[in-house]
Image (tube, grey):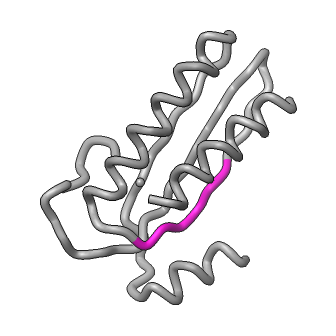
Amino acid sequence: MKKILFVAATLLALISTSCSNGGIDVNDPKEYCWKVTVSASYMGMEQSSEVYVWADGEEVQDAIEEAKEELKVFEAMGGSGKVTAVKSNLSTEESCYQANQQ
């Protein structure tokens, strides 16, 4: 369980500093509030974490690609993981960051 929490925390740190999967337009310069979810499973135990990030499509895509690279290390230890990002319905940068405080 500690490994799952460590990996999830590492991935969220990567995502919160910069964050795609299919459907994200990397050429869209407009910033949105993205709901990013990191899910991990190890030896039958599952952990999932969410973070809201204010970013444009390219930043979201870059961060998710970095997170997927980090997941490869976790998967080599026998775990599995997934990173997803979707636009949230939050329309301001302030409301996006406040969502992380709840």
Magenta stretch holds residue 1: no
Image coords of residue 59 (percent x, y): 33, 58
Q: Nearer the viewer, residue 7 or 88?
A: 7
Residue at the (62%, 53%) spot, across then down: 13
Residue at horizontal 46%, vertical 32%? 68
- Quadrant showing the N terminus: top right
Q: Which residue is most to the left? A: 27
In this rendering, position of residue 59 left or right of residue 99: left
Image height of 24 relative to 2, above or below: below
**Horizontal arrangement in the rendering, residue 54 relative to residue 11 (left or right):** left
Identify the residue at horizontal 68%, vertical 11% (top origin): 77
Q: For the stretch drawn in magenta, what is the main secondary structure?
A: strand
User: The C terminus lies in which quarter of the figure?
Assistant: bottom right
Q: Is 50 a magenta residue?
A: yes
Q: Quadrant of residue 74?
A: top right
x and y percent of residue 53 in the render?
48, 67
- State the count of labels: 0
Residue 3, by quadrant, is top right
Residue 55, given in percent of the width and then of the height, sits at 37, 69
Please provide percent x and percent y for residue 56. 29, 67
Please report the bounds of the magenta region as a residue range: 49-54
Q: Residue at x 19, y 55 (%)?
A: 26
